[in-house]
Image (spheres, helix red, strand yellow):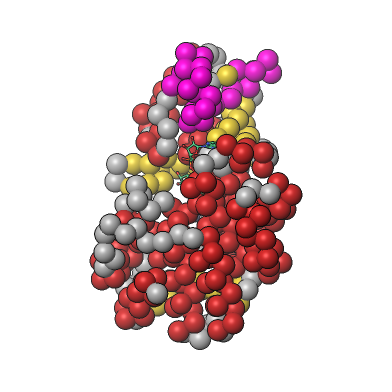
Amino acid sequence: MVVTSLGMLIIVLPLSLLVRHKPEHYGYRPDGEVSKSLEEVNHVYTWLLENHFERRSTIIALGGGVVGDMSGFIAATFLRGINLIQVPTTLLAQVDSSIGGKVGINHALGKNLIGAFYQPRMVLADVDFFKTLPREEFICGMGEVIKYGILGSKPLFEILENHLPEILQKDKDLLSRIVFDCAQIKAKIVEEDERELGIRAHLNLGHTFGHALETFYKSETLKHGQAVLLGMRCAIWASLQLKVLEEESARRMDRLIRQVGVRLPGQKKMDPPSLIAIMKRDKKVKDGRINLVLPAGIGQVTIRPVSDEALLQASFESLQD
Ligand SMILES: NC(=O)c1ccc[n+]([C@@H]2O[C@H](COP(=O)([O-])OP(=O)(O)OC[C@H]3O[C@@H](n4cnc5c(N)ncnc54)[C@H](O)[C@@H]3O)[C@@H](O)[C@H]2O)c1
Ligand SMILES: [Zn+2]
């Protein structure tokens, strides 16, 4: 942690490069999901109190989504709320988690169960951070980027379709444009529906199938963004069967996602009935009907309640093609 001359707090928790070089200065804290805990949050509360932080202090969340969610939760609760600035350093955090005000931590019984809606004063995104970002983390962010193209912007989708190899090589100009477009799409949806009572649910495209895959394979073998990419392929397939989506658009979407190159983990055989059982445990399922976000065209989605288990099963099986 660093205190600037302006009295601001900079939390540099899991940025492993910095931590590795100066552990005694920053104080080593664990990397990844484990730090989104009440125990870690309490550690920071104590540090803030011992160092006399007050209502006008600002927390700058410099890091990926883990740092953003956790620092945001601290900002929302410390002294009933202090200023928050998000400086996201992963692709996923720049296009998704730093925008929209959902902040929170995990509980032993589930992820992101303790939290708040708390908007940052500012989000500062710089694509230069991606220079050091491992390829696997970058691909995870691409899951959310493609999601925005499919759900809200034909021009964005076409940029992705026409320039995927350069984007995967981290071309700075293309990435600046893409991060800006995604952030704008998310901000617009959140402005309309901050508390997820309506249109914000569109952001769950690929996530209902994706969460089931993530839980089935465990997050060590299938990361969130990878699961979302596969989950979107299932949603596209289901949408085609339900005639919500026409064939040409489905083919273009599926081809773009396949080009990113994420596959089902080989070590465990996929079991659709178990996946459906996991889907039904989702807190968003009502009366056995699963509300699926389905692509309706490039740049458009719709929500359909689905109870046809054969269709859900076949959607998962389509991943084996
Ligand atoms: N609040 C929301 O709306 C929202 C939305 C989506 C996801 N999330 C949350 O976000 C989290 C995932 O975020 P994430 O994908 O950014 O993962 P992360 O924060 O764990 O970061 C991934 C890894 O990259 C490292 N890292 C970060 N920036 C780097 C850089 N520039 N160079 C090199 N290494 C870097 C981190 O230390 C970490 O090891 C999850 O906890 C998820 O629940 C929240
Ligand atoms: Zn996601």
201 left or right, relative to 166: left
86 left or right, relative to 232: right
Residue 287 vertical placement versus 194 (above, below): below
Residue at (34% x, 58% y) in the render: 265
State the image coordinates of residue 229 (x, y, percent, origin top left): 48, 61
Q: Spot the residue most to the bottom.
A: 243
289 left or right, relative to 25: left
5 magenta-colored: yes
Residue 208 seen: no
Residue at (50% x, 35% y) in the render: 67
State the image coordinates of residue 131 (x, y, percent, origin top left): 61, 39
Instruction: Looking at the picture, tell me which residue is in the foreground, 45 or 209.
Output: 209
State the image coordinates of residue 312 (x, y, percent, origin top left): 36, 75
Residue 265 vertical placement versus 248 (above, below): above
Residue at (67% x, 38% y) in the render: 128
107 magenta-colored: no
Residue 224 seen: yes
- In magenta, the rendered stretch is 3-28
Q: How many marks?
A: 0
Instruction: Looking at the picture, tell me which residue is in the foreground, 211 or 6.
Output: 211
Residue at (65% x, 62% y) in the render: 160
Q: Quadrant of residue 43?
A: top left
40 left or right, relative to 162: left
State the image coordinates of residue 59 (x, y, percent, origin top left): 59, 28
Residue 114 vertical placement versus 38 (above, below): below
Q: Quadrant of the C terminus?
A: bottom left
Q: Quadrant of residue 163?
A: bottom right
